[in-house]
Amino acid sequence: MKKRLRKILLISLFFSASVPSAMQAMEGEKTSQEVLDNYFCSKIECCDVGAMERILEDGVVFNWQDGYRVLMQAAKANNFKVVKLLLARNNIDINRRCRPYPTVLIEAAQRGHFKVVELLLATEGIDVDQLGMFDYTALIKAAIGGHSEVAELLLAKGADPSRETDNGCTALSLAVENARSEVVRLLIPCSEVNWQDKSGSTPLILAAKWENSTVDPKRREKFTNIIDQIVAAGVDPFIKNNYGTAAWELSKTVNCSFRALPCQKPALPPLSV
């Protein structure tokens, strides 16, 4: 019994001596890394590429997590030179996601930073359909933001317009909801125009709903333009959402657009909106 107590005492003394020193070392390491990260980010904000080149030439190599944070900051700031420098000098996995943040490509795409997106897409091994929070892709984020040039670039590099978010929304349906008419025009030829999200809504139903409920006349005009685009693509106005409502029941514009088509079949019922 005495030997056992003595063993426990020795072990406790060992840990009481070693743990604080280990914790201090870890704390010191964390502090120095934070200083480096903060310094680098400050140089990104003032576009001091020369200072960052000198640091990297001195042999500083970020691990994937720290490198990711710095690269993300550069992408957010639309600092093309810094992004290029980091990709060239550091072994950073740009397809990796540090939760809860998106990937670097998604971050650049949602902000409309065309040159940074172009650079990232030219990087070997890039996954153009990387998933972020709620299964958003770079194309979906570009569509929501109305960044048509970025969306066009992503499509040219193989981005899949049929990818869905966790709510079953595609890039087209979210572009419609956000009144991004230029992106809608770009996506219609390569998207399923009768696609239904988890609420059963098609892009046409969404456009009709928002046109009918929008107070701002300029924004309503955008939805009217979107409705005309979708109708011209051969959409089915009789598809109903989960609440039993079809697009033609929500908007006079849908009725007018379909009645203006040369061979409109079947005939739409009269609408009283």
Image (cartoon, rainbow, N blue to C red):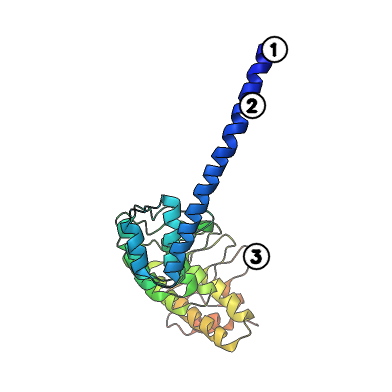
Q: Amino acid at mark 3?
A: Tyr
Residue at which label 1 appears: 2
User: From the viewer's perspective, is residue 106 above or below residue 186?
Assistant: above
Residue type, mark 1 in image: Lys
CA separation, marks 2 and 3?
A: 66 Å
Q: Nearer the viewer, residue 122 or 246?
A: 122
Mark earlier in primary sequence (2, 1): 1
Report the side of 241 relative to 186 (left or right). right
Q: Position of residue 183 (x, y in %)?
A: 43, 75
Q: Tell me the element at label 2.
A: helix
How far apart marks 1 and 3 lie (CA) works out to: 76 Å
Q: Which residue is mark 2?
A: 12
Mark identifier at residue 120: none
How far from the left and from the top, in percent, is residue 170? 48, 64
**Which sits in the foreground, 130 or 44?**
44
Question: Viewer-proximal residue, 18 or 95?
Answer: 18
Residue receiving disc 3? 243
* Residue occupying the point 33% across, 62% down: 54
Q: Quadrant location of residue 158?
A: bottom left
The extreme bottom residue here reads: 217
Question: Sequence-wise, which precedes: disc 2 or disc 3?
Answer: 2
